[in-house]
Image (cartoon, coloured by chain):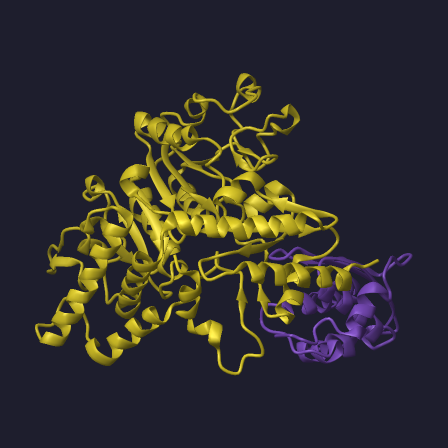
């Protein structure tokens, strides 16, 4: 990968009139856009602007063709069939789609929805609402807060399974589980479990699965055994790792365009082909209907039955350009090494600072990470973020929309630095230097 | 970019807060927080003849919420209640001396919200 050339493709780093070059470390929230994506959006409005699917004139035919080509690109990008790819308005919208459509119809009283306690609220609130409506129960993976990985902590005193309502019903014998083993999931996933939904990478601590291969494999094979459906939120994953829906063995997968160099306003929902009859449309209107009459209406085949109304056409074309860009410029193994090196440099610098606490499993972050979250004792993260902003460095501070996880960690907020392909080691060094200044200025005594 | 955010006066109020602590036999004690960032402010006050004769605060959170607690208590002490209830968010910005964006202004406004709530509770209890 030519990282220097890549950075030059992002006009925001050459902003005219800016006092200094942006140091953008909030990539877990959204990525910057290369010129190719920006051009694709304006090219649509300059040369193809028309509504898709319906008109017979050539302009609309061309726009429709381009739109459908993006569906194929996305399908290849995640190793799906093109009719398994549904365009939504974002990853949050995709999860709400599954909850309101599949969830409402297929969940009933006593059924269990299994989530990771580390989830972003976009993969928590849609289920909380559905659980209330259907009488289903939400449960959480046991999470080892000492090592920041899925599973039980080794320390017996940390086996407080009531922390955020985790496994209240588990009996004492299971409480005494001392470590993760292959049979772990048999205790966690039962016949009552109907859906398991989680992010592959946490938006706060990054990798949580990669301590051993068998953890995720075990979950998937156990889910298959009991017939539970699996939804993976790949929002934090798709920009940094190869997403392969077949390899992951998922039923549903969601991601956002804007985190993978594309524009906002478009998301992807993958629904496995074998579920296309089981899942009802979520939105109704133009484009999704085969025949509509006052007596009876018939939906189109998937994926069209899942897409009603005029979609964000220009954003979809922008997403197509983003995928082209990634295919042409990104080798995920190399990218991972690059981001892990940035994380390692930052972690090394942070380790020399007094009273710092890192959120996340450091050894996993050093190998697979793109996010480093931390707190400095007695300094509020907002102040550090605002101070760094004065130096042109953009980091995130707050609860990162994962309040249940923050409760579990017994903190209100944290600082988060998240990297992507255009970030450089020099930027990390600059941040560490500015962080030292921030601490000196903001410490009360 | 808020290059002037952590200016001298603000940092002085943060590091040497005025009116920080407790009042004996206060007329009101009130607490509120910003759950999105964890800023917490508690205020207590004493009212005599329609005047806030004493006010103290305890807060935790960012520099802004703590420093504006100090600034606001200094500003409000010995003022008429109706004057305090008339304080606007623009007044707070003038007090802080910087222009804050929509995300960060919540930190600076929390102490005012708490103080106004405390005074309202005090009056309700008198009716």
Query: Which residue is depicted at the point 65% across and 78% down?
Result: B99
With B70 as the anchor, is A41 left or right in this view? left
Quadrant showing the N terminus of chain A: bottom left
Task: Give percent across and percent down for residue B109.
Answer: 68, 69
Chain B drawing hue: purple
| Residue A398 in view, yes or no | yes
Task: Give percent across and percent down for residue A398.
Answer: 60, 56
* Residue A179 higher or lower than A122, as above or below: above
* Residue B1 higher or lower than A326, as above or below: below
The residue most toward the top is: A173
Name the residue nearer the viewer: A334 or A410. Answer: A334
Name the residue nearer the viewer: A414 or A408. Answer: A414
Chain A drawing hue: yellow
Quadrant showing the C terminus of chain A: bottom right
With A253 as the anchor, is B6 left or right in this view? right
With A29 as the anchor, is B7 left or right in this view? right
The residue most toward the left is: A56
* Residue A410 higher or lower than A223, as above or below: below
Name the residue nearer the viewer: A20 or B127. Answer: A20
The residue most toward the right is: B24
Query: Which residue is depicted at the point 20% across and 39% down?
Result: A274
Splitting the image into 4 quarters, where does residue A385 fall?
bottom right
With A199 as the anchor, is A386 left or right in this view? right
* Residue A388 higher or lower than A126, as above or below: below
The total number of labels drawn is 0
Query: Which residue is depicted at the point 14% across and 51% down?
Result: A301
Task: Give percent across and percent down for residue B76.
Answer: 82, 74
Splitting the image into 4 quarters, where does residue A32 fall?
bottom left
């Amino acid at each position: 990968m030519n990282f220097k050339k890549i950075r030059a493709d992002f006009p925001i780093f050459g902003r005219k009139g800016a006092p200094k070059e942006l140091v953008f470390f909030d990539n877990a929230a959204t990525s910057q856009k290369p010129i190719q994506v920006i051009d694709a959006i304006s090219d649509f409005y300059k040369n193809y602007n028309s509504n898709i699917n319906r008109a017979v004139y050539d302009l609309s035919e061309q726009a429709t063709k381009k739109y459908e080509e993006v569906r194929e690109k996305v399908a290849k990008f995640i190793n799906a069939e093109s009719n398994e790819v549904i365009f939504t308005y974002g990853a949050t919208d995709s999860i709400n789609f599954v909850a309101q459509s599949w969830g409402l119809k297929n969940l009933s009283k006593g059924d269990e929805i299994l989530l990771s306690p580390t989830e972003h609220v976009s993969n928590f609130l849609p289920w909380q609402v559905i659980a209330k409506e259907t009488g289903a129960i939400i449960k959480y993976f046991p999470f080892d807060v000492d090592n920041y990985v899925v599973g039980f902590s080794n320390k017996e005193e940390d086996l407080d399974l009531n922390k955020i309502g985790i496994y209240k019903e588990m009996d004492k014998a299971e409480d005494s589980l001392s470590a993760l083993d292959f049979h772990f999931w048999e205790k966690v996933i039962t016949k009552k479990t109907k859906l398991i939904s989680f992010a592959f990478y946490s938006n706060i601590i990054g990798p949580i699965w990669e301590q051993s291969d068998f953890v995720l494999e075990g979950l998937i094979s156990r889910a298959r055994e009991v017939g539970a459906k699996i939804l993976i939120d790949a929002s934090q994953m798709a920009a940094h790792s190869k997403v392969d829906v077949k390899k992951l063995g998922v039923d549903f997968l969601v991601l956002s365009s804007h985190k993978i160099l594309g524009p906002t306003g478009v998301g992807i929902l993958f629904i496995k082909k074998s579920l296309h009859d089981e899942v009802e449309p979520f939105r109704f209107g133009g484009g999704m209907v085969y025949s509509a009459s006052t007596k009876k209406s018939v939906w189109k085949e998937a994926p069209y039955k899942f897409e009603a109304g005029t979609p964000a056409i220009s954003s979809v074309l922008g997403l197509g350009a983003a995928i082209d860009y990634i295919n042409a410029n990104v080798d995920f193994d190399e990218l991972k090494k690059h981001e892990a090196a940035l994380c390692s440099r930052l972690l090394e610098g942070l380790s020399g600072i007094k009273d710092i606490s890192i959120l996340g499993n450091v050894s996993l972050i050093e190998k697979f990470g793109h996010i480093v979250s931390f707190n400095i004792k007695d300094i509020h993260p907002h102040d550090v973020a605002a101070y760094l902003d004065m130096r042109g460095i953009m980091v995130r501070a707050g609860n990162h929309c994962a309040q249940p996880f923050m409760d579990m960690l017994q903190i209100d907020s944290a600082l988060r630095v998240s990297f992507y392909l255009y970030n450089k080691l020099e930027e990390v060094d600059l941040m560490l230097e500015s962080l030292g200044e921030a601490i000196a200025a903001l410490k009360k005594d | 970019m808020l290059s002037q955010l952590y200016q001298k006066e603000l940092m002085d109020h943060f590091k040497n807060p005025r009116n920080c602590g407790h009042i004996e036999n206060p007329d009101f004690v009130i607490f509120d927080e910003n759950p999105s960032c964890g800023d917490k402010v508690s205020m207590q006050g004493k009212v005599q003849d329609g005047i806030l004769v004493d006010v103290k605060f305890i807060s935790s959170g960012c520099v802004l919420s703590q420093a504006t607690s100090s600034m606001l208590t200094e500003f409000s002490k010995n003022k008429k209640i109706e004057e305090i209830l008339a304080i606007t968010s623009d007044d707070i910005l003038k007090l802080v001396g910087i222009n804050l964006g929509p995300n960060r202004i919540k930190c600076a406004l929390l102490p005012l919200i708490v103080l106004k709530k405390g005074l309202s509770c005090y009056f309700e209890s008198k009716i």
